Image: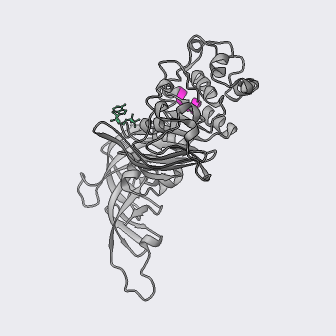
Amino acid sequence: MNNRAPATGPVEATGPVEATAPADGAERVAGPPSVIEIAGVRKSYGATEVLRGVDLSVARGSITAVLGASGSGKTTLLRLIAGFDGADAGTISIAGRRVDDGRRTVSARHRGVGYVPQDSALFPHLTVRANIAFGMPRRSRARLPELIVLVGLTGYEKRYPHQLSGGQQQRVALARALAIEPKVVLMDEPFGALDAALRDTVRSDVARILADSGTTVILVTHDQDEALSLADHVAVLDSGTVTAHGTPRELYDRPPTPQVAASIGIANILDGEVVGDRVRCAFGELPAPGAACGPAAAGEPAAGPRPCRVLLRPESLHLHSTPEDGTSPATVRQVRYHGHDTLMDLAVDASGDADGLALTARITGRAAPQPGQRVWIATTEAPHIWT
Ligand code: ADP
């Protein structure tokens, strides 16, 4: 990590760690398969309990996004991993070395961690080349041209930060973090300061750079799109604990709880009941194959209907303009046009009550029904179910 960044950058904030953190005294633990192992980490500020027992493993070479609402403790967790602050309890290990056990901590500069803050925090008076080289051990300087190529800044070496776009500045910050050949790169909302048009391009540039460099990354973000599109693994942080950890697809398609479903994309969550391999809900009867919904095992009495909750993502709902088999009538309440798709807020009218169940559907194409219009909803997919 470049722990000598500008005084305004978060990397400067080493806090009390160094005073209590003899690097040499660090305990070595048996090499885990992951680069980062966090177990039972707790952290309070005064009476505010921010982290309440965080467990997280980060696989070597992976990008893990820690996704959570503002105030959920993401930055606090990142600062503890970086060594800018110490945990009250629990353990943090990096590359097999215990760097925090709740009492003793290894200082930030001895953790081999690169840090990319939200605002890039470049030295305004140094060129691109000098910013990247700053903090780089002399023996590694030969890698400088290679790093500049990696982050796509060839030809920009002599420019100063104010002569770069926001995306280029973030790429310099990334190169600076990579320059020390870190065991892990920590990124704190690294695209938050970029405007929407630039964010997508910079994100995909950074994803390519990280993939090319094979670096292990933890990225904290409140942006679900960013977490799903950039990361190999997503950990959901809610009120100071990790409530879910999996691949983006696992968490989107089979979230462990309705709360997690609602924190990753739009979730229509309905009450229902499982009967054999079907699930009944206000929206109709849907297929529900799988163990949780299967028929009773041989020799056991047939199971009666079991209450469950049903997840229907907006894109699994299809709208028809006329009633057809297996469709449910609804009224369009609101239309939210997004260019590439349109979100339709619908009130399902299964019982003749137009103020019935609220659902959101996502449709593509140019022809979208208008508010007040009657539509008929169908889904062909088996929904995810919690029993
Ligand atoms: P996030 O990054 O998810 O937005 P943070 O980790 O920044 O969340 O903050 C979590 C909570 O901890 C917030 O309520 C914040 O006010 C509090 N907090 C963070 N740092 C400090 C601090 N140094 N002193 C007191 N409270 C803090």
Residue 152 in which image quadrant: top right
Nearer to me, 199 or 352: 199
Q: Residue at x 47, y 41 (%)?
A: 104
Q: Residue at x 33, y 75 (%)?
A: 305
Residue 335 image point, x, y percent: 37, 40
Residue 196 image point, x, y percent: 49, 28
Nearer to me, 176 or 244: 176
Q: In this view, does 163 lie above or below 69?
A: above
Q: Does the magenta stretch include residue 135?
A: no
Q: Which residue is drawn at 54% across and 29% down?
A: 116
Q: Is the magenta stretch mostly helix, strand or loop?
A: helix
Answer whether residue 140 is visible to the viewer in this image. Answer: yes
Residue range (magenta) = 198-203
| Quadrant where the image shows the C terminus | bottom left
Q: Which residue is drawn at 53% across and 32% down?
A: 108
Nearer to me, 379 or 156: 156
Residue 58 image point, x, y percent: 56, 48
